[in-house]
Amino acid sequence: MAKKVTVTLVDDFDGEGAADETVEFGLDGVSYEIDLSAKNAAKLRNELKPWLEAGRRVGGRRRGRSVGTGRAAPRSTVNRARRSASGHAATGTTSPPVGGSPPT
């Protein structure tokens, strides 16, 4: 048996009627999105307009991923730094040369 599912987005602000678009905005480093009717989306943009005009834009359309992952440095990076600090030359690679054998 065939089934048809319809999803209707409702305006998150007033709960009345269908939402026409999802509006994204941010404040204090937190990103938000809200589904709004065209009327409420225009109202939100109009109310934010004086604040946006007084502020500085610091990013593009969407915020990208952060540079760091918060994980520790890979073991090879730590070992390379340790060898360098103790006066040993770093080879820059752990791969064997083409056609050669691995270092011993």
Image (tube, grey):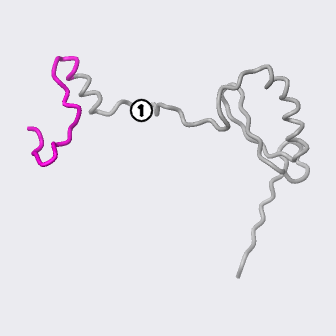
In this rendering, would 79 be left or right of 64?
left
What residue appears at the point 71 percent right and 79 percent down from the top-left corner? 2
Q: Which quadrant of the figure contains the N terminus? A: bottom right
Q: Amino acid at mark 1?
A: Arg
Q: Which residues are magenta?
A: 83-104
Q: Is residue 17 left or right of residue 62?
A: right
SS at mark 1 in the image? loop
User: Magenta stretch mostly in which secondary structure?
Assistant: loop
- From the top left corner, tell me how far across and down residue 28 is, in percent: 69, 25
Foreground of the two, 75 or 51: 51
Q: Position of residue 29 (x, y in %)?
A: 65, 27
Q: Residue at x 72, y 22 (%)?
A: 56
Identify the image quadrant of the C terminus. top left
Residue 102 part of the magenta-drawn span: yes
Find disc 1 in the rendering and name its residue: 71
Residue at 77% x, 46% y is 22
